[in-house]
Image: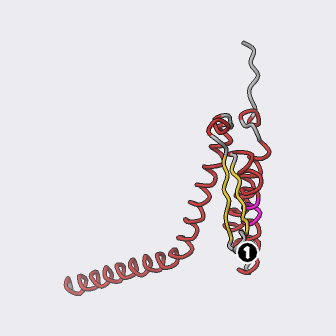
Amino acid sequence: MDQQPQGISENYANPKTCLFHVLFKAAALAFYILSALFVNNFVIIFVITVLLAALDFWVVKNVSGRILVGLRWWNEINDEGESVWKFECLDGESLARMNKKDSWLFWWTLYLTVSNVEGSFISSTYGKEANEFFNLYTSNLHAEHIEKLELNIKLSK
């Protein structure tokens, strides 16, 4: 009956791999979102964000994809000189032995990262236009309201 509380690392079969899987994604997104507060040069922001995203890609492809969910893929050149992609995954029996929390973390961080990047893209692409439209629309409503008030004042005199 005397149970010790389980730490976070005990829930995952590969806690360090999980940490780095999440860390590189978070670093790229956080830098992209927060860098505009500290750096005014778009080129520097772009280059560092791309480097962080490349590090994340490398970690997913070569480390966390293999360890957490058993994925492997690479490129080969065949005899005709064409590029051929090879994909491997674990068989059903080995896949059933994988840690469910590791697998869940791997896939959901991929999904959430893509959602965040898409949201950032939409916000940065259409955010200014939507804000300008809203400001223009509300200023027009305000101007019409002022004109009606002035007209009512003139009519009441």
* 79 up-or-down from 66: above or below: below
Please say whether residue 62 is one of the residues in the magenta stretch.
no
Amino acid under label 1? Answer: Ile
Q: Foreground residue, 28 or 71?
A: 71
Coordinates of residue 14 in the picture (x, y in percent): 77, 41
The secondary structure that most of the magenta stretch takes on is helix
Residue 148 is left or right of residue 74, and the answer is left
Q: Quadrant of residue 59?
A: bottom right
- Which residue position is annotated with label 1? 45
Q: Quadrant of residue 152?
A: bottom left
Question: How dense is the environment of label 1, judged by Cα within 10 Å: few (below 14), some, or many (20 and up)?
Answer: some
Q: Which quarter of the image is occupied by the C terminus? A: bottom left
* 35 up-or-down from 88: above or below: below
**Secondary structure found at label 1:** helix
Coordinates of residue 100 in the picture (x, y in percent): 64, 37
Q: Quadrant of residue 99?
A: top right
Question: Residue drawn 25% across and 83% down?
Answer: 153
Figure colour scheme: secondary structure
Task: Name, please, the residue furthest toward the top.
Answer: 1
Coordinates of residue 145 in the picture (x, y in percent): 31, 79
Residue 104 is left or right of residue 16, and the answer is left
Question: Residue drawn 24% across and 85% down?
Answer: 151
For the record, the magenta segment spans 54-58
Question: Residue drawn 76% across and 61% down?
Answer: 58
Residue 86 is left or right of residue 59, and the answer is left
Coordinates of residue 49 in the picture (x, y in percent): 72, 70
Q: Foreground residue, 4 or 101?
A: 101
Q: Which quarter of the image is occupied by the N terminus? A: top right
Q: Foreground residue, 157 or 62?
A: 62
* 27 up-or-down from 36: above or below: above
Question: Residue drawn 75% across and 75% down?
Answer: 47
